[in-house]
Amino acid sequence: MHKHLFILSLLMTLITHGFCQSYEDQLVIENNLFSKTFGYHLSEGGAISVEISTNLSDNPIATSENMPFFSFVINNSIVSSNDPLWVYRSSSTRQMGNDGTEYTIVFEGVKRPVEGLQVKLLQQVFPGSTLIREKLILQTEQNSFQLNKLDEKLHFKFPSYGLSRGPDNTLKGTEIRIASFNKKPITFGDKKKGNHMYYPDINPFELSEEVTSVKGPISIVNNGKISWVSTYEHASQDDLNGMFKKPIAQNEGNLINDAMQGTKGVFNFSIDEDDFKFLGISSELENDQINISVEILRGGYLEGEVIDRDHPYATVWNATAFYKGSNLEDGKAILRHYLFNQICEKSVSRIPEFYYNTWGMQRNDRNKPLRGILTYDRIFEEIDYAAELGVDIFVLDDGWENAQGEWFPNQARFPEGLSPIKEKLDQHGMKMGLWYSPMGIDSTTQRYKNNPQWVIKDSEGHPISAQWDHPAFDFVSDFFNVFIEDCKKMIDEGCLFMKWDAINTFYSSLPNLHHGSEEYSEEELRARYEYLLPVYVVRAMEILTNYQPNLVIEIDLTEARRVMTGLAPLSQGKLFWMNNGASTYNDYSAFRTQSMRTIANEFAGIIPLELFTYANYPHNLAGKMEYNVHNSLLAGHGFWGNLELMNSAERTWIGKQVKLSRQVLPYLVNVNPKVIGEVGDSPEIYEIVNDDEAAGQVIAFTSKPIKTEVKVHVKMDKMLASLNNPYTTSKDHLIIPIDLKEKESSVAVIIIPNLGKGVSITSSTSPITDAVLQEDKLIYHLSHAGRQSIIADKKLGKPRIFGSKPLTSAIDERDSSFQIEVEAEEPDCEVTLYFEK
């Protein structure tokens, strides 16, 4: 059974753990792993019950019996799904673009204080998965309602589940954070330095009768039998790390002159780590039950915020899942699958692509104008060079625009617009990408002068200085629509990739926009703005990717204070995670590359590496071209820097490596990397192999000469060849002897599948640099003299062997295959096997 929604239209009774309540009807969402049942009433108001059942347990594993599925304060009254106020109104389904099914279920209040208030539940279910992605919307056709606080605090809980308590007396949970800036020092070079990046942070916690709230955005709680995964899709930094040049007391009334990345001004209010806790995932023990809720903590709504026909209220998306046992790695696997396959419906942002960004080239020569270097002629040159690298996307960074906030081609540098550049890219089959600073606005522009209501100000009433000392517009306003129209115009001109930069914490307390009127205090306006900013950014991403489904948007998270560090942007795009890390621009050494690789090393197993973008210098100016390029094959898939500083042979070699990697990357997007060592260790190995398809990459780095061996499980009958390093095989294992003779060196072994064609090169004493299987022949290239063993199915025909250099060969005919031995006597030899039927 794939997945279904059942509506049973007869009077029934739900009995759960001895608790009995009558419902007129029920609705069941299910797939092959679980069912979720909503019990409800059709005429007179009643409660809404929720329970989740699975074959892992005889009883429901989660219910709303003692823990309401939702709870909020409306018109100064606390109401919940367990109150006898609700009737069922409608339900519908939508087939999603990622094989999921979205169910929309609408309940309506028929008694005070919620008479006329509709609760719309969005429930997304996926085949072969226990994960439910869900969202709640409050709406009304005619009436008007207000959201309120409870005991001076925000109170909105959704979703909430009550789990049965298992036999274990010590119940534990795990919080996974992903936005801890400079959490620890680097593991290479000067180990006192930070890496100028956001780190994951995994923290265990114990459950008790007191409420334990974690920031997350991921929490995993085990009840002794199953583990329950809870996530929410929002974004914020975890702590104050990196926010200020030096430690500053966060006491009431301090003056903060923040000169860090793009938010300068005087702010006479305290800043605390709790300011980043907009949402939390709470857990508590209550009798024989574990209660788990996602709850709003800060900025989620204003006291008295109106819900009417024109102003519905929505929570962020949340996801819940469960699995048997307590193995954290099983929970991480659910998380990775969710982030790559379920959170996003647009598959284009999940396709592995290589890109080039002009920013490194623009920063190459300080004596040349940073933006003025972007001319037609110079860009055309760089496009030709990037084409040799084999990239799919060419990104024009800061400087293509007329001015910040004027997102059309610079009229002085590009009098004919970007059409000539787009035509040049089309010649090479590359997509055009553009950089944006969505909130930045040049104070000399007419748009700035015409819209003072959008200009964010500090505590003294002066415009803040954002990126490059420009002011910033408030995005939680009508400016949102203006920016979207700007982007649509460039999409119409052919832009299929966008980099959104400098989305920072700007502390807007501007009144009468979309985050509150002048009736509210600056503190309330600021909290609502900071909560809504990630929501608005993701909504803009969604609108634009709906407008152009082939558009990919990456969000720049390279600095502290970036507000989009969270799960929310992954619902629509990717994450640009680092500029230079512990290094600087124009560092072509292994040190900068190690900084970049820290992302893969730290996040492997948590967030799929294909969701990160970052750029390496591919140059050989420090003798580390292979080392640097292998880093881009591993993850990030980006290049930047002045490609004019390379020769054509270097660029062509890189293009060949990119082509080989591109062959196998589609097989690897759902593979969890196996990582050996920290960055800077000898060895440091990344094994990303789809053993069922015999496709993969094994990339090894070292800081000192080493010899080691990697043994990889692969279905040998499906492997064509293993490239770039000698190897042998034993049953279903590929054995790779790694011999790196220089410090700061690397090798990238690419495992090529045979697509079921029945031929495999089972061993080679010298590196094979390429292998191609055509309809009636196998062609492979050797960098050195050496010997290969090949098995070919007899159905292909009898092989005839030729070489571009002298070689010897022998063929042993067996029952169903040919065993072939080839020995090339000289380096740089191309070997061809023709199969004659």
Image: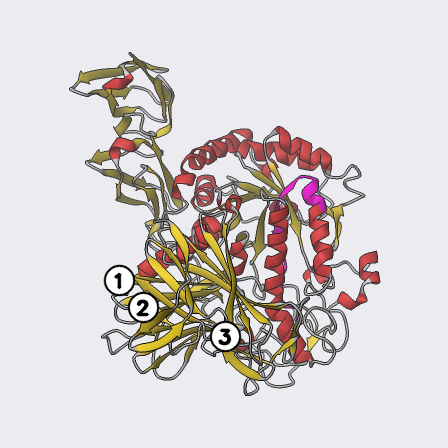
Q: Tag on residue 127?
A: none
Q: Distance of mark 1 from mark 2, alpha carbons?
A: 9 Å
Residue at x-position 26% and y-position 65%: 57
First in sequence, mark 3 or 2: give its number.
Answer: 3
Residue at x-position 51% and y-position 77%: 85
Dot in front, 3 or 1: 3
The reply to whether the C-beta atoms of the residues labelled 1 and 2 are less than 8 Å apart is: yes
| 408 and 379: which is toward the camera | 408
Q: What residue is pinned by disc 2? A: 61
Q: Amino acid at mark 2?
A: Ile
User: Neighbour class for label 1 at 10 Å: few (<14), some, many (≥20)?
Assistant: some
Q: What residue is pinned by disc 1? A: 56
Q: Amino acid at mark 1?
A: Leu
The reply to whether the C-beta atoms of the residues labelled 3 and 1 are less than 8 Å apart is: no
Q: Tag on residue 44?
A: 3
User: Neighbour class for label 3 at 10 Å: few (<14), some, many (≥20)?
Assistant: some
User: Residue 603, image x and y in percent?
Assistant: 42, 57
In the structure shown, which secondary structural element does the residue marked by tag 3 occupy? loop
